[in-house]
Structures are given as structure tokens and as C-alpha cells.
Amino acid sequence: MQRATDNITIRQGDTAIIRCYVDDKVSKVAWLNRSNIIFAGQDKWSLDPRVDLVTKGQLEYSLRIQKVDVYDEGSYTCSIQTKQQPKTSQVYLIVQVPASIYQVSNDITVNEGSNVTLSCLANGRPDPAITWRLLNPSAEPLDGEEYLDIIGIMRTQAGRYECKASNDVATPDVKYVNVIVNYPPTIKKTQSSETPVGRNGTLRCEVTAVPTPEFEWYRDDKRLANTQSITIQTSGTTTSLTIANITEEDYGNYTCVASNRLGVQNASLFLYRPGTGRDINGSACVSQSLWLLLASFACLFLKC
């Protein structure tokens, strides 16, 4: 009798063949799982339809288990009887299970500055390693395993988070969590207009904000609306004010106001005649969001 390998490692769902070889001096042979008889000679004692014998002539007496599962893991013994003495060969079957993520955080929306915890739970044999990435251009690994803690989340940390569970048994399992970070409007870019009398002049205001802001335009304290000579257009986080057939009375300061539920910010833009020396890309009088103003006052009061 030749001894089989002491350990056999196989992936869940595959077919395992546990080898046992005998010679013509053997009178009796059997397969046992722990203390349970599976086969005695050619007689099958097991009721499991996945289990059968692999024999080649009289020299091989191997056990085949199809669609292996975790409950098949354990010790298998090939026992033979010769005229001299009984002999056994024992093999331990190790069943590996691919990593599988069974629970992951739902997509979430939070305010900037909040603390966020994302969870990703997985099982497998051996236990899988869990890694996180934020799928931005760098996509560098993040410090976290089953739980990823983000303290004081910033707008730059919004995006699609990837959780990957791997144990080298099969292709890693991957799940995703989308994180939206709300923050108040910030004026990103303004464009004033240098336009002669009789022409059309356009002022533009671009902001960053989540959720998408609402816009208003003012001339002094008067809120502007679409008229025959004024056209206000808004697309996402950009708004424009176009004044047709400009007159001398149209020159001056205009205010773009952007607001969402987290704050308000405004910027002054200028419609001016050529040669007056205004900065066409000026963004004078940009005011801070309400919450930033309050924070500044508090800081001054506390002398921080």
C-alpha cells in the first residue's frame, strides 16, 4: 500500500479524489470518514450520491467526492487487511471557500465635517483580507478593514468607495458604496463684462456646492428677473445674466447670490464700458457663507 498525501486542499464546489493504492496481497479494503464507513470493498455504505470509487484494475481503490462542501472537511482513512496485518493510510481533506461579501453599507449622504463609518463584512476559508479604496484618480488604499472610519469628512472625500475581500482561493469579491458630501456654496469663478453701448453683455458666476444651489441676481437691492432685455440662465452650478442692447443706465455693479440649505455666498460683478479699467475676471466683494462668518466671529471673540 502506498500512502496518499497527508493533506489535500480543494476549493468548495470542485471534485476531490483521495488516492489509495493496494496490491494483490490485500484481502479486504474499506474507506472511512472519521469512524463512519463509506465503502467496504465495493459495497457503498454512504447514502451520499456525490461519493463513489475510482478503481483501475485491482491496484487502485480511491475515493471521489463531487461538489465538495465545507462539511466534507475532515479525516479520511483507507483501511486494508492483508494476511500479515491491517494497515491504514489517513488523509485530511481541507476545503477552501472563496471570499464573499455578505454585508456592506448602503449609499449615504452626509454633511461636510461629519464622522462616517463604512462597513464591509465578508466570510470565506481561510478568512479573507478586506481592503478599501476611494476610486479617485490616485485610488490609493485606505486604512480600514471590516470598518472604515472617516473623521470629519471633507468634500474631496466624496465619491465611490470600493471594498474588496480576498483570500487567494478565487477572484476577490468587490462591492461599492457611494458617499455624497453636502457643503455650502463657494464662488469658484466670476466673469464681468466690458461691453459698449448698444451691444449685449453677459455676466457669469460659477460655484461649487452640494446639493446644487439656487441662484439669484441683483442690481443694487433689486432682484432681477427675465424680461425683454434681461435673460437669466442657470445650468447646474453655473448661472449667467445677459443684458441686451446696453444703455448707459445698465453699467454698474451686479450681484450673483448662490444658496443651498447649508449656506449662502455672493459675488459682485461689473458691467462697464470699454476703457474704464475694470478687471473683466474680477470677483470683488465675495462674501463668506453664513456658517463661516459665524465661525470667524467666534474665533475672534475667543482670541483663537
Image (cartoon, helix red, strand yellow):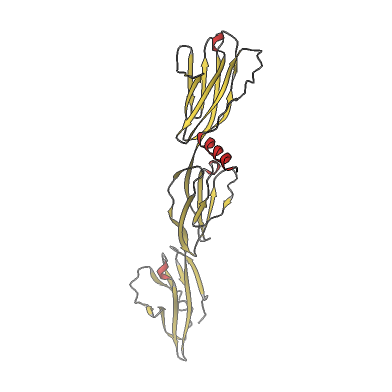
Residue 163 position, x and y percent, is 50, 52
Residue 149 position, x and y percent, is 51, 53
Q: Which of 207 and 75 is in front in this view?
A: 207
Look at the image and tell me whether residue 172 can be seen. no
Q: Which residue lies furthest to the left in this view?
A: 47
Q: Is residue 52 above or below residue 133?
A: below
Q: Which of 210 and 293 is in front in this view?
A: 293
Residue at (50% x, 42% y) in the render: 112
Residue at (60% x, 13% y) in the render: 195
Residue 286 position, x and y percent, is 57, 28
The quadrant holding residue 296 is: top right
How many tags in the picture? 0
Q: In this view, does 71 lie above or below 24?
A: above
State which quarter of the image contains the C terminus. Answer: top right
Q: Nearer the viewer, residue 187 or 156?
A: 187
Residue 150 position, x and y percent, is 52, 50
Residue at (51% x, 53% y) in the render: 148
Q: In this view, does 274 lie above or below 70?
A: above
Look at the image and tell me whether residue 46 can be seen. yes
Q: Is residue 174 above or below residue 227?
A: below
Q: Nearer the viewer, residue 282 or 56?
A: 282
